Amino acid sequence: MKAEKVVLERIVEILQPFVSGKMEITPGMDIESDLAIDSLKSMEILASLEDVFDISIPLNVLSEVRTVEELAVQIQKLVEAEK
């Protein structure tokens, strides 16, 4: 399994508790409009991502991503940079 796919799957697991109901999260979904993730939830998600992937995520990364897939790409880049 590709590392990117593993990262994407893990991100979906982290996002799931923050979305309402049993919505299926797909890579193309917009984090803010489709998933209704507000700034407070974003900070909680950021902390969870940092813990799970053992990385430090600059705050500007969140402003640069719109979709779940874009978030996964950015997280993958940070993970690789930490190696």
Image (spheres, helix red, strand yellow):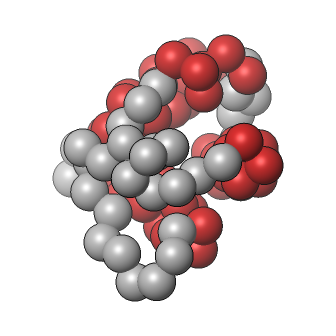
**Image position of 29 (left or right of 35):** left
Q: Quadrant of the C terminus?
A: top right
The residue nearer to you, when weighing 27 against 8, is 27
Residue sitting at the far bottom = 22
For the point 71% across and 53% down, the residue is: 41
Residue at horizontal 46%, vertical 83%?
Answer: 21
Q: Quadrant of residue 24?
A: bottom left
Q: How far across and down, in percent of the image, does residue 68 sit?
A: 38, 43
Asked if one can make out residue 62 in the rendered structure from this viewpoint, the answer is yes
Q: Residue 15 in the image: x percent, y percent?
A: 53, 61
- Left or right: 34 in relation to 59: left
Vertical arrangement, residue 10 with respect to residue 73, above or below:
below
Left or right of residue 81, residue 12 in this image = left
Q: Is residue 16 above or below residue 3?
A: below
Q: Nearer the viewer, residue 51 or 63?
A: 63
Expressed as whole percent of the image width and height from the top left, the position of residue 5 reads 27, 48
Q: In the image shown, does 72 or 65 lie closer to the viewer?
A: 65
In this picture, is 58 found above or below 54? above
User: Percent position (x, y) of residue 7?
Assistant: 41, 47
Residue 5 showing in the rendered view = no
Q: How many marks?
A: 0
Look at 67% across and 16% down and name the residue there: 60
Please name the residue shown 73% across and 22% down the image: 59
Image-quadrant location for residue 62: top right
